[in-house]
Image (cartoon, rainbow, N blue to C red):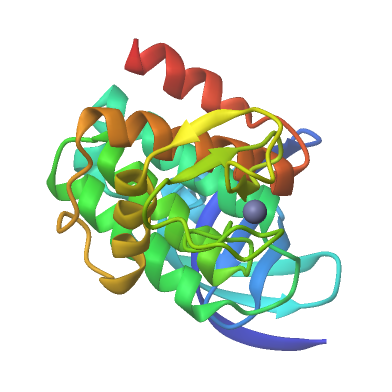
């Protein structure tokens, strides 16, 4: 067992027994890991508020497959502006839960680490909007290799540029000839999503309302196909958005 210093985000935190906690962390160095924080509940002195969801922390830990052991946690940011706004909290919790359920354990994904960092920075400095959430999602799917085809039909390879596409359950986009029904995806929805992949900067892509709706349908389908279960934070997010 070796002791290492890691850059991490807290994805979720679970009470264990009377005095301990198990935290899920997304680290730059090893991707998603689980860590045991002995005494984290009993003594706030030891870890303080460092183990709250979406906190950015530097940890010292004994790294072990399955369950690492947390020795020390130093806060880089707890994102105080996010924590003062219910809409921003809902979006930050959703982003963390999505990373928690969709990434493989123990595999570093530095580009996704930077994307999550950029999204939390964005939420810290500006109100939560759906454009940013969708920007985060399409980039996340792309980085993990789960991005649906935005340019051509995944069955016959016909380009979507003129007629757009038809969304299937499960997030697949097909041309009109290959699909036997489904929800429409206008060319603008597909090109807006493609544009999100060309810039790594939040706030540069604007989704018109009808594009936001259609792009959202595609992302919802693709994410639920790959996350395997319904995200708890999604209900909170939908309540907030109503
Ligand atoms: Zn086709």
**Residue 176 spot, x, y in % from top left:** 58, 41
* Vertical side of 234 occupied by 69: above or below: below
Tally the numbered discs: 0
> Can you say which quadrant of the picture contains the C terminus?
top left
225 on left or right of 87:
right
- Residue 62 image offset from top left, x and y in percent: 73, 78
Q: Is residue 23 visible?
A: no
* Quadrant into which the N terminus falls: bottom right
Q: Is residue 105 left or right of residue 61?
A: right
Residue 46 lies, in percent from the top left, at: 53, 56
Q: Please state if 65 lies on the left or on the right of 119 as rendered.
A: right
Lateral position of residue 190 relative to residue 101, left or right: left
Residue, far front: 177
Give residue 179's quadrant in the image. Answer: top right
Whole-percent x and y of residue 78? Answer: 33, 51
Residue shown at 49% from the left, 69% from the top: 112
Q: Which of the pair 13/39 is nearer the observer?
A: 13
Q: Say above or below: 108 vs 146.
A: below
Viewer-proximal residue among 142 and 90: 142
Judged from the image, the quadrant occupied by ligand 1 is bottom right
Nearer to us in this view, 18 or 101: 101
Q: Looking at the image, which residue sits at the far bottom?
A: 2
Q: Residue at x 30, y 23 (%)?
A: 86
Residue at 29% x, 26% y is 87
Residue 204 in view here: yes
Q: Quadrant of residue 33?
A: bottom right
Viewer-closest of 141 and 127: 141
Q: Is residue 212 above or below residue 49?
A: above
């Amino acid at each position: 067992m070796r002791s290492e210093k890691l850059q991490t985000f807290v994805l979720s935190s679970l009470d264990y027994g009377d005095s301990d906690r198990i935290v899920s962390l997304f680290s730059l160095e090893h991707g998603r890991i689980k860590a045991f924080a002995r005494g984290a509940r009993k003594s706030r002195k030891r870890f303080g508020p460092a183990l709250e969801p979406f906190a950015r922390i530097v940890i010292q830990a004994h790294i072990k497959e399955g369950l690492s052991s947390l020795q020390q946690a130093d806060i880089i940011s707890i994102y105080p502006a996010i924590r003062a706004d219910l809409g921003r909290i809902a979006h930050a919790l959703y982003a963390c839960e999505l990373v928690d359920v969709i990434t493989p354990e123990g595999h570093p994904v530095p580009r996704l680490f930077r994307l999550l960092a950029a999204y939390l920075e964005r939420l810290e400095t500006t109100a939560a909007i759906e454009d940013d959430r969708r920007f985060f999602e399409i980039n996340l799917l792309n980085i993990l290799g789960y991005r649906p085809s935005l340019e051509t039909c995944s069955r016959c390879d016909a380009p979507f540029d003129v007629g757009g596409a038809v969304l299937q359950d499960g997030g697949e986009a097909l041309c009109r000839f290959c699909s036997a029904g489904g929800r429409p995806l206008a060319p603008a929805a597909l090109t807006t999503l493609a544009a999100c992949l060309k810039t790594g900067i939040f706030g540069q892509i604007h989704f018109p309302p009808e594009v936001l709706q259609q792009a959202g349908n595609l992302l919802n389908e693709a994410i639920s196909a790959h996350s395997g279960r319904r995200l708890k934070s999604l209900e909170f997010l939908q309540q907030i958005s109503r």
